[in-house]
Amino acid sequence: MPSSTVRRCYVGRFAPSPSGPLHLGSLVAAMASYLDARAHRGKWLLRIEDIDTPRVVAGADRVIMGQLQALGMHWDGAPVWQSQRHALYRASFEQLKAKGLVFGCACTRRVLGSGPYAGTCRRQPPPASAIRAWRFIAPAGYEQFNDRWMGPQQQDVQAQAGDFIVKRADGLWAYQFVVVVDDGEQGVTDIVRGADLLDSTARQRVLARALGQTCPRVMHVPLLLDENGRKLSKQNHAPALDVDHALDTLNLAWQNLGFAKLNNADSLQAFWASALQHWARRFNI
Ligand code: GLU
């Protein structure tokens, strides 16, 4: 059945962390989410994920916005900044607390070690004064979903991730939590992003349901790896995008999504028009 019969109006988003300018890896994810939103005649929102303040680089948000615009990727409506949405996060956190779905955890990093959380503070609540972080009670059993690129997925969240953190020991809201609150509040129906976040999806789905939300459809696109097989990232000093040669840059990202170079596209408009047709055909939109 073509997905044009989907009743909910498509809302997609690109949610960069402003820890530096976009690089080719983040452009691949942005391009895929942009094309999917436009192919569905949906909305494409921009959300600046600046909640993890120690990682934020001042001005990187504006640089990212400039890069998107230079490449002809225009978002709908006003962008949102997570750093301005604390009241929203607090309200959702209180909702989870009222439902008894989170608990305070006093464990230190040393006690925790690596691997899934063992549930110590869930079984034996610490005194309020000792609470460092807040964790969500992961449900037992497999969380199953279909990824539009990667196919059927399943994860036993309790066994593989354990009760995961929604509010960190340093007082900051955790990525897993804010991303779900934001996607719910912004009415996001479709998430298209890099495959490094595939592993987070099951956690985000159980959290979304706990908050009474409908889980968005997901598509995780393959990551761009450097010559050592590591994810291309700002931390690995991925080269900045060349927006002065926008068509070459776009074609590079496009080819990394597995498509053939669009040789005949001689303007941004022509590039996007052609890419959209290919995308819609490939994903039967
Ligand atoms: N802010 C995240 C990142 O830049 C993406 C979050 C998401 O798409 O869910 O990796």
Image (tube, rainbow, N blue to C red):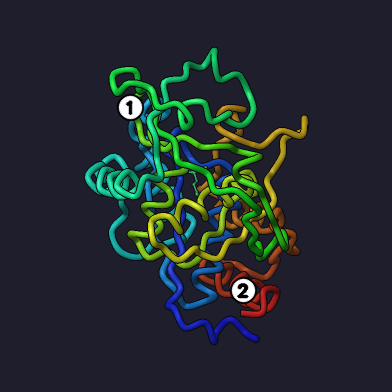
Q: Which of the 4 image quadrants contains residue 173?
A: top left
What residue do we see at 69% from left, 62% from top? 149
Does the residue tagged 1 have its C-beta within 8 Å of any atom of ligand 1?
Answer: no
Reading the image, the residue beneath label 1 is 171
Q: First in sequence: mark 2 or mark 1?
A: 1
Category of crowding for the residue at label 1, using alpha-carbon neighbours closer than 10 angstroms: few (below 14), some (14–19), many (at least 20): few
Q: Amino acid at mark 2?
A: Ser
Q: Say if 109 sits above or below 76 in the image.
A: above
Give the structural element (helix, strand or loop) at label 1: loop
Reading the image, the residue beneath label 2 is 274
Q: Which mark is residue 205?
A: none
Indicate left or right for 93 with 190 as reference: left
Q: Which of the 4 image quadrants contains residue 4?
A: bottom right
The image shows residue 200 at horizontal and vertical percentages of 57, 46
| Quadrant location of the N terminus in the rendered image | bottom right
Give the structural element (helix, strand or loop) at label 2: helix
In this view, the residue farthest toward the front is 124
Which one is in front, 154 or 280?
154
The image shows residue 160 at horizontal and vertical percentages of 65, 39
What residue do we see at 57% from left, 30% from top? 117
